[in-house]
Image (spheres, coloured by chain):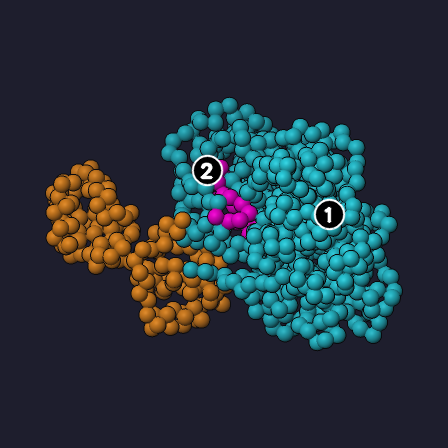
Chain colours: A cyan, B orange
Amino acid sequence: MENITVKINGVELEVPKGTTVLEAAHMAGFEIPTLCYMKEINEIGACRICVTEVNEGRGFRLVAGCVYPCSNNMEVLTNSPKVIASRKRTLELILSTHDRKCLSCVRSGNCELQKLAKDYGVEDASLYDGEKNVYEIDDTAAHMYRDNNKCILCRRCVAVCSKTQGIGVIGANERGFKTYIGSAFDMGLGETSCVSCGQCIAVCPVGAISEKDYTKDVMAAIADPEKTVLVQTAPAVRAGLGEAFGLPIGTNVEGKMVAALRRLGFDKVFDTDFAADLTIMEEANEFLERVQNGGTLPLITSCSPGWVKFCEHYYPDLLDHLSSCKSPQQMFGATAKTYWAEKMGIDPKNIVMVSIMPCTAKKFEIGRDDESAAGVPDVDFALTTRELGRMIERAGINFLGLEDEKFDDPLGLSTGAGVIFGATGGVMEAALRTAVHTLTGENPIDFPQVRGTEGIKEAEYPVGDLKVKVKVASGLSNARQILDDIRAGKCDAQFIEIMACPGGCVNGGGQPQVPMGIRNFVDIRAERAKVLYNLDKSMPFRQSHENPAIKKVYEEFFEKPGSHKAHEVLHTSYVKRKVNEI
Amino acid sequence: MNSAKSTVPFKGTPEQEAQLLKVIEEKKSDKGALMPILQKAQEIYGYLPIEVQAIISDNTGIPLEKIYGVVTFYAQFSLYPKGEYTISVCLGTACYVKGSGDIYNKLQEKLGIGGGECTADGKFSLDACRCIGACGLAPVLTVNEDVYGRLTVDDVDKILAKYA
């Protein structure tokens, strides 16, 4: 690749041809602020916050640094008075039709607009006040709301929905000053084929979209002496929660998280990882059964409720391929309200099951049909990692100062196979560890071909006389490629893992928001996944079938994987939906 | 919600649908096919209600929202059918300074619809138009082929009554 020379704020450096001004400045140690830019996903140069002065021999002029390519001998000024004045004016104009209700905004403190307004000294946010657009809040979806009074029209949410996820239920309607982000015919999001993945929330720079917050309801349940309030935490939460307290991306906070949950007043602090092990027992069994009895193949995992809803809307003809296993969240709730309730002599009606999830689609999942094994919903409240962060903050718990604590027995016991569920390829690897053992008695642990953040991975493993071909996809536009192959009869895999979010649950729509200025240069999926793979290595048991608590729950309750009882409690059914329901 | 869904019942025929499907089949593999498909669809149906946009979405794979975004961006596309009587109020300079804006607002209030929309019974649709070359009669409006000039806000009721 040809290199060119650029001079940024007096710092001379060589960059590959085609490098943008923003990327070159980053290499030279200068960050250019952005509001709309997302590398490779939303390169539209629309918000004009990234304006930068460049001189290509004809004097300095302002360009959009995020998309403008460097030329040889270009001089760049990223912080000149002209640049600063322009950015400040742009902020003032954005704020002229923004509701500016920062005091209690869910994003106050980590809002990208608020930070820029402070950095650029926007003292009078009402300077350009004039006509204002006033919008109704859309709260029709189970998992989130949209408050367009805070929207800055950066279109990040639109870009992830249509490009990363291949869905496109939100977009820009009308034009000019009247432009707003919404759905076709002003349908509420809940009336569209939105899959609830929440990737839009994860990239929103401001407080225009956010999950529905159930922290108050959970605290009320904890305060109710009649209720036994249990909490379960998904694998990926321990890899993301630290960010809400200023810790570096990729910090394991499992011990502190458990300690904080106990201090919030939960009666038992359990681990979804236990149910991940349970999922593997059921799913590996289902896979082997389908292989041996000529069932529908490839079998596709069903842990990701965003993926399940996507399949129901967009590929209803392939629902037979979906595993009938409930997701770990639901298996956990179902087991807690049947097996554990019976063991403890507690009426399941008095158990409140709370889950902490890196996911917003889990809020939709708890309300699905056929997810209430004990006659009451398996899970009562699904909170995101962000909501847990807010609860801890509000309770005045000194998170960083907490000593590590351990999960409660027996539903807090898990294996390395359970914890890697939170990363793309993790469910597949966990399933292979148990399936290979069941078929051959061998105990391979590492399946490196299915690890890593690539959107689509495939591998082939000899298992006894069988050759098992597997595929792994994360991000729904990647999933589409595999699903289209299955439809066309061109897919030769027998077992497929699909996760709705790119990189799997570690990058779920419920994880703490990372400012785009960092996301554009750091692979948060890989950093958070490392936490889970390191935990896996440190665990005494690394195969789900080795989990002593799992062995016990089958002995005492479920008998064996795939039993009648297991089907009643741990399996579910799906519904056919349409793309355009009018 | 659903505020932009037309309240006029959709009266599309199987012939119209067959015509539209043929257009989609011809054009859908072209780059930038959406605009020409929408133009043809509007020719066929006269407007682009949700039923028509959904046919386009289902048969091209283009998300409904993307289609709706394009339709609401361009003034040439309409979400509403024309009424039995099309009322056009001239908002050109001469008419406007003579108060046609007030007449336009009064009509919206009386008919209970916004500009570009059609009443639920399909009777009246309302549009704003630019100069129709009758500035001497300003302010002017037309109802189908009939021209009314030198109007005041009080004339609105009388005009509507003629067509009721």
Q: Amino acid at mark 1?
A: Met
Mark 2 falls on what kind of element?
helix
Residue A249 seen by the camera: no
Indicate whether A26 appears above or below A186.
Answer: above
Disc sitting over residue A432 in the figure: none
Magenta segment boundaries in residue numbering: A140-161
Q: Which residue is identified by label 1?
A: A344
Q: Nearer the viewer, mark 2 or mark 1?
A: 1
B18 on left or right of A503: left
Q: Is residue B42 magenta?
A: no
Indicate whether B87 appears above or below A124.
Answer: below
Mark 1 falls on what kind of element?
helix
Query: Is the residue at mark 2 from the same chain as the one at mark 1?
Result: yes
User: What is the chain identity of the residue bearing mark 1?
Assistant: A
Disc 2 + disc 1, Cβ < 8 Å: no
- Answer few, some or many: residues within 10 Å of disc 1's Cα (few below 14, many 20 plus, some between 14 and 19): few
Q: CA distance from mark 2 to mark 1?
A: 49 Å
Q: Amino acid at mark 2?
A: Asn
Task: Tell me which residue sits at (67%, 42%) in the image.
Answer: A228
Whole-percent x and y of residue A230?
A: 68, 43
A183 on left or right of A487: left
Whole-percent x and y of residue A203?
A: 59, 44
